[in-house]
Image (cartoon, helix red, strand yellow):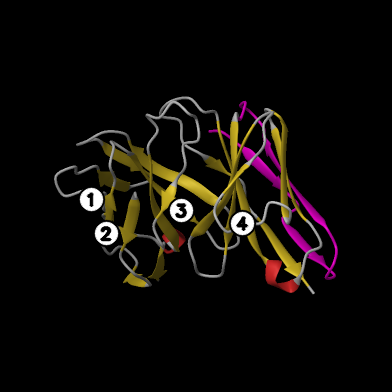
Amino acid sequence: GDSVTQMEGPVTLSEEAFLTINCTYTATGYPSLFWYVQYPGEGLQLLLKATKADDKGSNKGFEATYRKETTSFHLEKGSVQVSDSAVYFCALSDLGRRDSSYKLIFGSGTRLLVRP
Amino acid sequence: GAVVSQHPSRVICKSGTSVKIECRSLDFQATTMFWYRQFPKQSLMLMATSNEGSKATYEQGVEKDKFLINHASLTLSTLTVTSAHPEDSSFYICSASSGYSNQPQHFGDGTRLSIL
């Protein structure tokens, strides 16, 4: 079945460092890919998405490119801030299905800690 | 962006109590709502998918008599944890989708349930 694999955390960086969180996926169809962020004690917020190969999703300085050849969707940010400290989840969904279930399959999450 | 409201944010109650959690889509019609459970420092586990006006579809291993889901309108779904016990303590998160192609799930802020 479909699956998502994320790099294990925690990832600890100093402020203004470059961030990469790796995400690879396995899917039989042509999924859409997402990054969600979860701040402590809160639900998930959609950070960015990409719906087809070579699409680049971007938001708040974060970006990720849908790479079909490597089945990857790595999250990057050029200069992290303390406020970026959170758990980041990579996810996929086959939104092309017509049955409207649109299940999300999540990776295990990667905790990011940014120190001042 | 789309807003999903989840209430209450925190519940503390005695063992044997039934607890109801509400999930509302505030600015769009949610044809499909999802209920997740999240254990500390772990990913989200999908419990069930509910479509407005029909019975929920539960994931394998989730007790449907224990976790009652109602999706009576396009803006409201409820999860009732019946006769809750300490092992039901967890973080429960709902999400909602309009069901249209390429539209992602939007998440509530979660409910932390603590059973004493």
Determine the secondary structure under disc 1. Answer: loop
Q: Answer few, some or many: residues within 10 Å of disc 4's Cα (few below 14, many 20 plus, some between 14 and 19).
A: few
Cβ atoms under marks 1 and 2 closer than 8 Å: yes
Q: Look at the image and tell me in which quarter the C terminus of chain A lies.
A: bottom left
Most foreground residue, B1 or B35: B35
Q: Earlier in the sequence, mark 2 or mark 3?
A: 2
Residue position for label 3: A37
Residue position for label 2: A22
Q: x and y percent of residue B57 in the render? A: 59, 42
Q: Amino acid at mark 4?
A: Val
Cβ atoms under marks 4 and 1 closer than 8 Å: no
Specify whether B103 is left or right of B66: left
Most foreground residue, A94 or A15: A94
Does the magenta portion include A40?
no
Determine the secondary structure under disc 3. Answer: strand
Determine the secondary structure under disc 2. Answer: loop
Magenta stretch, residue numbers: B1-30
Identify the residue at horizontal 61%, vertical 52% (top origin): B93
Identify the residue at horizontal 54%, vertical 40% (top origin): B106
Q: Nearer the viewer, mark 2 or mark 4?
A: 4
Q: Nearer the viewer, mark 3 or mark 1?
A: 1
Residue position for label 1: A72
Most foreground residue, A61 or B113: B113
Residue position for label 4: B62
Q: Amino acid at mark 3?
A: Val
